[in-house]
Image (cartoon, grey):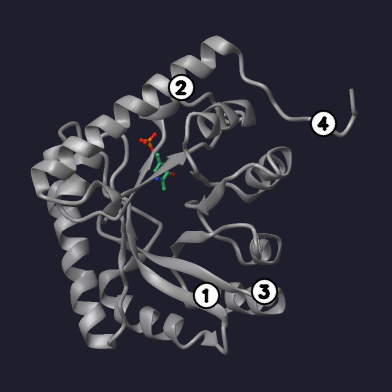
């Protein structure tokens, strides 16, 4: 056996469990789309794999899942290396740090969590150095108790700055907005946040004359409400993988 072949094989039992969970989530998505009169292909399911092993990701790839998201660069890059050659689109949904921007360049199809001009400038510079256009979403802070995300009052300024960081096919490509509302017991309580993010996107798109097609909103506890309110990307961890193991 080649020593370089480190493909992390899941057990058959775990692979079956993950495939069944994935199917159940897709069924719930399809029903939410039907209720909202939306085309099921208009919502992309991103499996949030943070803290879960590469073997779980491989099982889900074999079950047809293609989009995965990570929250920590130091965890994401080794997993990507373990799974190199697999048909995976990697997303980044965690807190950004300027010192990690260089290592991130070219590693993620979409960064969901851009929230400051400083990060935008650094990510644009590193992406341009790598000769690429990095697709990004701006994370909006819709709840007082949150740290991440730009305040609503500063959103239009930041969006304008990000749009200006696209230069000759390199830099940043702003595709829309992301939010992470407070976690509620009842998903209905999250619904107004989703509706609000959509309004913010619509206003911004009109005022900046930019398409901004994507709304990344909805997680395990509330993704159906998010779909009904216009999510184009949902980020689901626990419903697909089960509870997250404690951070190593
Ligand atoms: C962990 C995480 C998720 C997934 O959360 P679940 O409740 O397990 O579905 C979604 N979005 C972000 C930004 C996350 O950090």
The mark nearer the N terminus, 2 or 4, is 4
Mark 2 neighbour density, 10 Å: few (under 14) some (14–19) many (20 or more): many
Q: Residues under labels 4 and 1: Cα distance? A: 37 Å
In the depicted structure, whether residue 227 falls above or below residue 79: below
Q: Residues within 10 Å of mark 3 (few under 14, many from 20)?
A: many
Give the residue at x 70% y 60%. 103
Q: Quadrant of the C terminus?
A: top right
Q: Quadrant of the N terminus?
A: top right
Answer left or right for 215 relative to 15.
left
Q: CA distance from mark 2 to mark 3?
A: 36 Å
Name the front one of labels 4 and 1: 4
Q: Is residue 221 left or right of residue 126?
A: left
Which residue does the numbered mark 4 point to in the structure image?
5
The location of residue 205, given as percent across then percent down, is 25, 79
Residue ID at (57%, 89%): 168
How would you rate the neighbour count of disc 4 (Cα within 10 Å): few for under 14, some for 14-19, many for 20 or more? Answer: few
* Residue placed most toward the observer, 223 or 51: 223
Instruction: Let me know if residue 190 appears in the view.
Output: no
Determine which quarter of the picture holds residue 174: bottom left
Q: How many marks?
A: 4
Q: Which residue is mark 1?
A: 120
Q: Which residue is mark 3?
A: 126
Residue density around tag 1, few if under 14, some if 14–19, many if 20 or more, within 10 Å: many
Q: Secondary structure at mark 3?
A: helix
Q: Quadrant of residue 185?
A: top left
Counting from the top left corner in percent of width and height, residue 52 is at 56, 29
Circle on res. 18: 2
Q: Which callout, 1 or 3, points at the residue further toward the start of the chain?
A: 1
C-alpha distance separating marks 1 and 3: 10 Å
Residue 17 visible within the image: yes
Where residue 182 appears, as percent x and y from the top left, is 26, 45
Name the mark nearer the viewer: 1 or 2: 2
């Amino acid at each position: 056996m080649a020593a370089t072949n480190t493909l992390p094989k899941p057990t058959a039992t775990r692979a079956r469990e993950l495939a069944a969970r994935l199917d159940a989530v897709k069924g719930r998505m399809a029903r939410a789309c039907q209720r909202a009169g939306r085309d099921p292909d208009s919502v992309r399911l991103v499996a949030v794999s943070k803290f879960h092993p590469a073997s779980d990701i491989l099982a889900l790839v074999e079950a047809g899942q293609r989009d995965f998201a990570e929250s920590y660069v130091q965890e994401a890059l080794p997993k990507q290396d373990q799974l190199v050659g697999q048909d995976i689109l990697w997303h980044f949904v965690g807190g950004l740090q300027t010192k990690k921007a260089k290592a991130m360049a070219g590693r993620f199809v979409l960064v969901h969590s851009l929230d400051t001009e400083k990060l935008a400038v650094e990510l644009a510079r590193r992406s341009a150095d790598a000769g690429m256009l990095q697709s990004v979403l701006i994370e909006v802070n819709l709840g007082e108790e949150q740290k991440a995300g730009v305040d609503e009052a500063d959103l239009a300024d930041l969006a304008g700055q990000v749009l200006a960081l696209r230069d000759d096919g390199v830099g940043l490509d702003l595709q829309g907005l992301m939010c992470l509302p407070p976690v509620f017991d009842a998903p209905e309580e999250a619904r107004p946040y989703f509706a609000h993010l959509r309004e913010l996107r619509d206003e911004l798109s009109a005022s900046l004359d930019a398409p901004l097609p994507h709304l990344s909103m909805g997680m395990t506890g509330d993704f159906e409400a998010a779909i009904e309110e216009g999510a184009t990307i949902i980020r689901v961890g626990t419903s697909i993988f089960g509870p997250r193991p404690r951070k190593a």
